[in-house]
Image: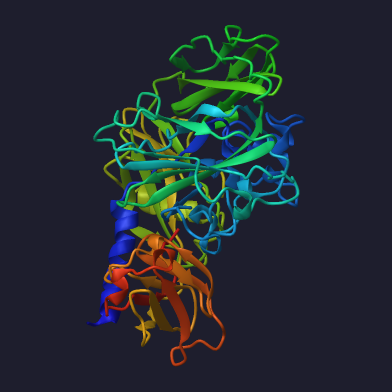
Amino acid sequence: MNHSGYLINFFSWLVLFLFSVATFSHGVIESPASREQFCGVESKPDEIFKEKMTHEKCRPIMTKGDGTMDNSVYNFMAVLTHTIGRSNKPLDQLPAHVCGFGSESWGGGKTPWDKAIDWPTNLLSSGSQKFIWNISWGNHFGDTEEFVYWITKPDFQYDPNKELSWNDFEPSPFCKLNYNDQTPNANPNVTPDKTNNRFITTCTVPARNNRAVIYGEWGRNSHTYERFHSCIDVVFSDENPIPAIKAVIKPLPSQVSGAAEVELDGTESEGANLSYSWSLNAQDLTAYQLTDSQNSKARLTISNVSAQQTVTVNLEVKQGDAASRTSIQFTHMPAVTATWKIVGTVTSTNTLNAGDKLQLRLIDSVGQDYLLPQNPLVLTEETAKAENWAFALAQVVNSGNQYSAKIGVLGSDNQSIEPVKSSTENKIYVPVQSEITNSFIKIEKQDNPVTTCQSLRKQGSNSYWLGYDVYADSTPIVLNFNETGIDLTKIIIEHGVFSNISVLDKDKLLINTKPDWVSKTIPGYLGFYGPNYGSYEPFNSTVSANCRIGPLFKQ
């Protein structure tokens, strides 16, 4: 078999599948509040310039060393990978960072939510608890497969100066819930709330006597293997029952036109001695000003806008350390008849480089994705500059597409949209009657050229042990076991001379580090043992894993 030709065809197909055919979603754990919920949904980076933030403890992760705000926090809904997640992998096969799980949106590195700070906490009791995922940024119910939760060990001691490690957590999840949208009511512990774009999951939480962290995953099926990762910081209160409180917002108008003053009323919230905290979400927040945001009644001053957009009002009520959250939305329209609505902001968490590829990703009301242009824009050294790439993408998107989507700044006539050379000012617009509800920028990072390497089955391999000689000049090395029948999630991996190894899914193994002496002529050893060091029939296959050099998943 010509492995080289197969590899090129296979990975070309795989990249096409992942980024052109597959749908994408975005979400966070809303309740109990995850780190992204506290520091992303409720507190936002622009708050660092205010005297008081919605959650003051979020300030360190939102402030760069030079005092400017970290705009990557605005991508709080995109802490994702295309893997099978934590699963039952050995610790040495897991990413270095827990909460972000080596998120692709941050280039496999540390996300803001991995940082060591004194994170805001939730009061929690052991026993039956609900964990609610907000998936309104891409409501893909149809291919959701599972929700999985792990908790820190009983002797875990939280240290605000130390990042979490996998050794801090129990090796097995305390809750694993399967879901199939074809039979959405089959699992009583998973409720798809399609009206509000939420998944409500119910788990039995083990008891802890101190502060703990819960790590959760929302996994989609093998069509994408897309998975979202999140951490929840909790303080247990089993001895003192958590007060029964509930945040309630009195109904608001479903639509507001032009400039207005709106009273936000939380006086019907349930509980005694409540404290209140109001916040807002919108694609463009410049038209809104909250006053009395720490009172039961707040005032929202609304300026006129040029384009229609959805505004979300959030209320958190607290009694001591107990908290409850709710939100309500309204549509804000210009004083004159609206032509456009804002569905996104043109931003990137990564520095872009020549060779990177860009597309505009539009999401409609049922979660379907559409990519523009059909062939991605390939950046040059000039167009990759922070102030230039949005302008360059607009040139190919705005010239004409079936969704009438445009990138740019809306003119004073409320009709014309022109892109500007800026890293922050461009928005994404569609006609007000469009079914498009959200949009993002899809970035495919330029990789080193994909080259092949070689993996050969070692003499003496048997049903109990399988050895490989791997020939490669550089890393990362990807071994694909698809044709061997071997399921990497079921076997034991002996690293041999290699290190920093990760199981991407049941077929693919990523090797990030090799000794300098391993080359295309001098092999390095890698070994495998059967489950529990027992016999494993697929080891008897004489077919070797396919080998190639270069990252498997583009960002």
Residue 282 % position (x, y): 52, 30
In the depicted view, which residue is nearer to us: 57 or 533?
A: 533
Q: Tell me the quarter of the image containing the N terminus.
A: bottom left
| Visible residue check, residue 283 | no
Q: Picture coordinates of residue 369 (x, y %)?
A: 32, 44
Picture residue at 46% right of the left edge, 69% below the top: 493
Left or right relative to 102: residue 361: left
- Residue at the top extreme? 268
Q: Is residue 98 above or below residue 49?
A: below
Q: Residue furthest front?
A: 534
Question: Image quadrant of residue 74?
Answer: top right
Q: Is residue 466 left or right of residue 129?
A: left
Residue at horizontal 44%, vertical 26%? 308
* The furthest residue to the bottom: 521
Could you tell me residue 46's position as x and y percent?
66, 37
Q: Quadrant of residue 40?
A: top right
Q: How many marks?
A: 0
Q: Nearer the viewer, residue 90 or 63?
A: 90
Q: Is residue 546 above or below residue 62?
A: below
Image quarter in which the C terminus is found? bottom left
* Residue 395 visible, this angle: yes
Outermost residue, left direction? 1
Q: Give 148 or 25, whichever is nearer the viewer.
A: 148
Q: x, y (%) of residue 71?
A: 61, 46
- Left or right placement of residue 18 versus residue 334 in this view: left
Q: What residue lies at 62% left-to-right and 41% top-to-bottom?
A: 213
Q: Is residue 505 above or below residue 342?
A: below
